[in-house]
Amino acid sequence: MTIRQIKEIIGELYLKDRTLVCDDYDYCLQYLKKFLDFNIYEYPSGESYWNWVIPDKYTVREAYIKDLETGRILIDVKDHPLHLASYSASFEGVLDYNELEEHLYWNENVPEGIPNYHKFQYRPWEKDWKFGVSSKQLEGFNKNGKYYVKIDTVFEKGALKVGEYFKKGKSDETILLVAHLDHPGQVNDGLIGVIVELAIMLELINKETHYSYLFLIVQEFLGSIAYLNTCKKNIKDFKMGIFAEMLSTGMNLQLQKSFLGNTYIDKVAEMVFKEQSVNFELLEYMKGVGNDEIVFESPGIEIPFVSIVRARTKGKMYDQYHTSLDNMDLLDDCQIEESLIMLRKIIDALESDMYVKRNFDGFICLSNPSVDLYFDRGVLGIDEKTKVNMHNFLFGGFRLFDGKHRISDIAMKYDVPFGLLSDFIHKMKAKGLVDLSHA
């Protein structure tokens, strides 16, 4: 999938009212299904998992605020889905400004952005309503005026829907790729993660892989929770996962660690980031974002998840976060491409990483023609630091060929690029000097 295709898909879907259970969300799933024929699982309204309740299907017929003095409609959900908080209850009546203000939501730090208000969708037992407005729009309200408010919303039984695609590998050990499709009217949170992981999955289905792969398109928290509670696969096979969102915000790419921070996926992902990018930021768990990785890392589930994002720097989220300004203007070809490369490189490393077991003892002569594996420090295209580190490995690293260390372990210990070391060790395998295995 090209960058152009990724942007075209995002452009088609981002302004849809992608709340938890609604026609627009279902439309988006069906649209994506044209690219990858995934399964769709349904979870009926009213079902409860870990005390989270699947809400009713939600439909907005109309919602607007009219200035009675001028007759002008000041706010209309037709202009942007964020103008009405998801799962707002129906209401019709005339209010003065003070009464209306209690139901308005804005963000003074982003004066031109319509903010995202999402509380009601997670609390179906609360019946209230709010309009999202920009601070600029708020200036157009007369504080002495009267306002006619019309909200016509429908709540009915429906089903929360989760997309699942499973690619079987040689092993049952499964790597999860997870992203959430909800958050209406926003590009980075988290639509872009869905499309980038979709692109990666389309590459994987045509490859023979050691690991199995599970791609999940979910609603934040609820989709992952419902899926895990009803999963027909063996969750014990779920070994690690990658969550992706907020991939084109203008910030440096960030790798957020798992809960434990020192798991296998943490180490490999950090190794890849260090090799591929000089500007990335390494974040501790929950110091960048907090989304579905929380569900998969929760007690009793405990699947280590790293997150690839461009979310927060110096404690501050990107300026357009949770507003209507998180739009197509933020999409940058280079940032999307870099995100794809990182995901691809992490998976490539996981696939090619193996335990190394030597079939020799002693200090072998690599320059002997029967071995012919001498590493020439004069080789072009390798920096001096790498040459020195590779030399150090050759004069001691073979001790780690004990069947207990992976290629990545050795690469990180000697600060040698994973690909370079992997190629060298595979040449040793071809000479019968080592055996390689995933377990």
Image: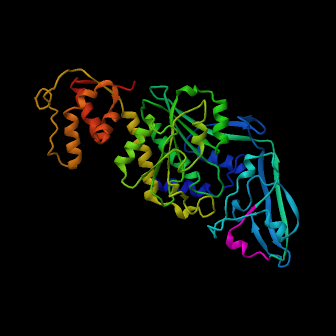
49 or 102: nearer the eye? 102
Q: Is residue 329 above or below residue 430?
A: below
Which residue is the extreme one toward the right? Answer: 93
Percent of width and height locating residue 186:
61, 57
356 displayed left or right of 67? left
* The residue stretch that appears in magenta: 131-142
Q: Is residue 140 magenta?
A: yes
Residue in the picture at 67% in, 51% down: 18
Q: Is residue 271 above or below residue 79?
A: above
65 or 126: nearer the eye? 126
Is residue 381 something that shows in the picture?
no
Percent of width and height locating residue 45:
77, 39
Q: Is residue 204 above or below residue 331?
A: above
* Total marks placed: 0
Q: Considering the image in quadrants, where does the C terminus appear?
A: top left
Residue in the picture at 42% in, 43% down: 344
Percent of width and height locating residue 239:
50, 31
Q: Is residue 255 magenta?
A: no
385 displayed left or right of 290? left
Q: Is residue 34 above or below residue 432?
A: below
183 displayed left or right of 145? left
Indicate how the structure is coloured in the image: rainbow
Q: Quadrant of residue 302?
A: top right
Q: Quadrant of residue 143?
A: bottom right
375 displayed left or right of 407? left
Percent of width and height locating residue 296:
58, 36
Is residue 264 something that shows in the picture?
yes
Residue in the picture at 80% in, 63% down: 102
Which residue is the extreme one toward the bottom? Answer: 70
